[in-house]
Image: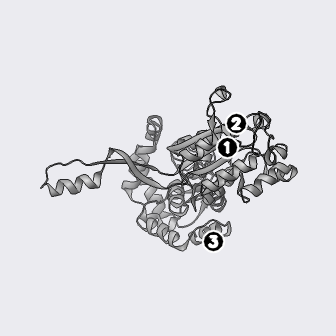
Amino acid sequence: MLLGLFEALRAAKLPVALREWLDLIAALDADLAFADLDAFYHLARSVLVKDERHYDKFDLVFGAYFRGVRTLDLSRAGDIPDAWLRQSLQRLLSDEEKARIQALGGLERLLEEFQRRLAEQKERHEGGNRWIGTGGTSPFGAGGYNPEGIRIGPKGGGRRAVKVWDQRQFRNYAEDADLSPRNLQIALRRLRRFARTGAPEELDIDGTIDATAREGGLLDIKLRPERHNAVKLLLFLDVGGSMDDHVFAAEALFNACKNEFKRLEHFYFHNFIYDQVWRDNQRRFSERTSTLEVLRRFNPDYKVVFIGDAAMAPYEITHPGGSIEGWNEEAGEVWFRRIKERFRKLVWINPSAAGTWSYTSSTQLIKRLVDEHMYELTPAGLSEAMRWLAR
């Protein structure tokens, strides 16, 4: 039966390897999940899915595959330990539910009867008031009605059984998900290089154990710097004009970058990069930073990300004096090439839909300037951009 699930996952193009499948089988042999579809779902997802982007596809395949499961496999009835049933029900039942099952003589009586009927029953049963099956009024089964009982299988009937074994809640982490900060951060995490630098503030458990052993059992506490993402990011954000239509997307990405990267520097520009940029839009005319100063201050190992819709008149890129905010002695293209020559990796993130990029000459110009490394501002687009930057 489970081999069919493996085949269904592979057919849906999920990257599930044979090694991961064998790990799941080993986990089941160790009884990490038994007679509980919800527990098996979480176990299978933890073992088989290594990337949160595939959670949604896994949920769809899992739900479709197990949609027809109605009853517990009675061939393993004798394998259900009393202790497991008792602990599970005591943990899951509310005080009200515990009071209701007294109608059958208490939890002990309910479990004894459940085990006895499992041992006696030899085949699937539907309807009636005794056997474990679907429909009917037995205290055990699915799709029927009994106010005090154990439900085995999908929800249904009066929905008042003690435990619905197959209730699951799935979350969507698909690549085409919305631009929530969490989805963006998941995409940005492809650009990670961890290091431990700074003041030693975190307890080093392994180091403390080793040092204590060397001191003959006398406690010797060791600290270490916190582990963090060592990637350095330089962010240039287009602001104003046509970017007003993309404020939400740009803010969401900016906040995700601040949460993910400890070494983040940012500057604003309008339409295209010239000889000056600024950090505060409220003071953009009085407190500006020379682009040459940016080139001198930051090392070539910074990853550079431009965020802008790339929609402007082509001359704003190609000609001196093209800036609509002031006179630029040199063309914006010249300044962009200087940034490109200074830093090793550079991408352009475009909040406009990729299908519209061919409609504007300026977007095509910028795509050539960034060597085609322009990506759409979606979780999938960001993932591709981070892969390129991480190379």
Name the residue: 80% across, 35% down: 324
Q: Which residue is mark 2?
A: 248
Q: State the quadrant of the N terminus.
A: bottom right
Crowd band around label 1 with a 10 angstrom C-alpha radius: few (<14), some (14–19), many (20+): some
Closer to the eye: label 3 or 2: 2
Labelled disc at residue 114 = none
Tell me the distance, in whole angstroms, between the alpha carbons under discs 2 and 1: 9 Å
Circle 1 is placed at which residue position? 179
**Rendered image coloring scheme:** one colour
Q: Give the residue at the far right of this rendering.
A: 359
- Answer left or right for 245 relative to 207: right
Q: Position of residue 389 (x, y in %)?
A: 60, 57
| Residue count near mark 2 (Cα–Cα under 10 Å), binned few <14, some 14–19, many ≥20 | some
Above or below — where is 9 with respect to 179? below
Residue that label 3 marks: 7
Name the N-terminal-most of marks 3 and 2: 3
Q: Residue 68, located in which quarter of the rendered image?
A: bottom right
Upstream in sequence: badge 1 or badge 3: 3
Q: Residue furthest left?
A: 216
Q: Which amino acid type is shown beneath numbered disc 2?
A: Phe
Earlier in the chain: of badge 2 and badge 1, it is 1
Q: Residue at x 75, y 46 (%)?
A: 332
Kind of residue sitting beneath label 1: Leu
Residue 250: percent from left, percent from top: 68, 40
- Please identify, in this view, whether the residue under mark 2 or under mark 1 is nearer the observer: 2
Residue 358 visible in image: yes
The residue nearer to you, when weighing 224 against 22, is 224
Residue 53, picture quadrant: bottom right
Give yes or no for contact between labels 2 and 1 (Cβ–Cβ under 8 Å). yes
Q: Are marks 1 and 3 in contact (CB under 8 Å)?
A: no
Quarter of the image where one finds residue 5: bottom right
